[in-house]
Amino acid sequence: MGLNEITERMHKAEAAAGRETGATRLIAVSKKQPDDRVAAVLDQGHRIFGENRVQEAAGKWPGFRERYDGIDLHIIGPLQTNKARQAMELAQAIHSLDRPKLAQTLARLAQELGQCPELFVQVNTGEEPQKAGVLPAEIDGFVSECRALDLPVRGLMCIPPVDEAASLHFALLAKFAARNGLGGLSMGMSGDFEEAIALGATHVRVGSAIFGARPAPA
Ligand SMILES: *Cc1c(COP(=O)(O)O)cnc(C)c1O
């Protein structure tokens, strides 16, 4: 696989869904990938990347930013409030806004820093106890709360349960977003990004299908 094949498959999925070419952004998820693989994708001209840990992102992206212009970094993993400032200084988007305390922290920091990344509210569409995300019944209230804090909520994000048809969850997320007047849909990974595009994804998060399998920790 690789960047070109994924881009081509995205364009086909967009065409099949009657959507414009390029309607969906590709976030290349570079977590745990060796630097040479990331540099190869940067050298191909790609600039949108996703990391799920602030610590890891802070270790590698300032260096890449010295070598490459226009990098658009998205934090897609669980965010602790004590890492929020670092995340806001580093990233252009955060896809894991999932609780009131984090919303309050981001709002306070946004005031202080005079800027805020675009935000996606993570929804636990499968209502899985071990998974982060706002429960479906709480979305509307939480989105209102974020708006009252003046947070730039761009859309919703989900990670479907591994053992269920992803498309059901993508369709649900699209419905929740529409109901709240939100245009952004962060959904779809290596195994299901085409289904996500068919159901309106504006951002897909694809890692292993671009870079290859993540090396096992030594
Ligand atoms: C790792 C990760 C991805 C990418 O997963 P792949 O299966 O490698 O495409 C997408 N979204 C989130 C939140 C992730 O943590």
Image (tube, helix red, strand yellow):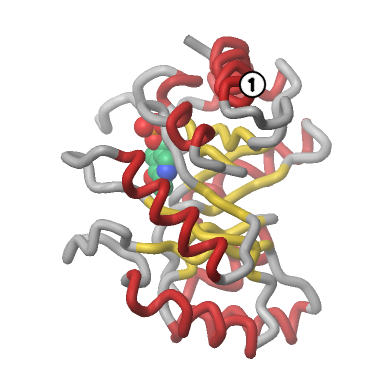
Q: Quadrant of the C terminus?
A: top left
Say which of 203 and 59 sits in front.
203
Furthest residue to the front? 18
Q: Residue at x 56, y 32 (%)?
A: 28
Residue 106 pos. (x, y %):
59, 79
Q: Circle 1 — which element?
A: helix
Say which of 108 and 34 sits in front.
108
Residue 100 pos. (x, y %):
45, 84
Say which of 35 and 126 sits in front.
126
Amino acid type, label 1? Ala
Q: Is residue 36 visible?
A: no
Badge 1: few (under 14), some or many (20 or more) residues near its Cα, within 10 Å? some
Q: Residue at x 42, y 34 (%)?
A: 189
Q: Residue at x 40, y 61 (%)?
A: 78
Q: Which residue is mark 1?
A: 15
Whether 8 is drawn above or below 195: the answer is: above
Residue 196 pos. (x, y %):
47, 37
Residue 177 pos. (x, y %):
53, 62
The answer to which quarter of the image holds residue 18 is top right
Q: Quadrant of ligand 1?
A: top left
Whether 107 is drawn above or below 194: the answer is: below
Q: Residue at x 31, y 59 (%)?
A: 125
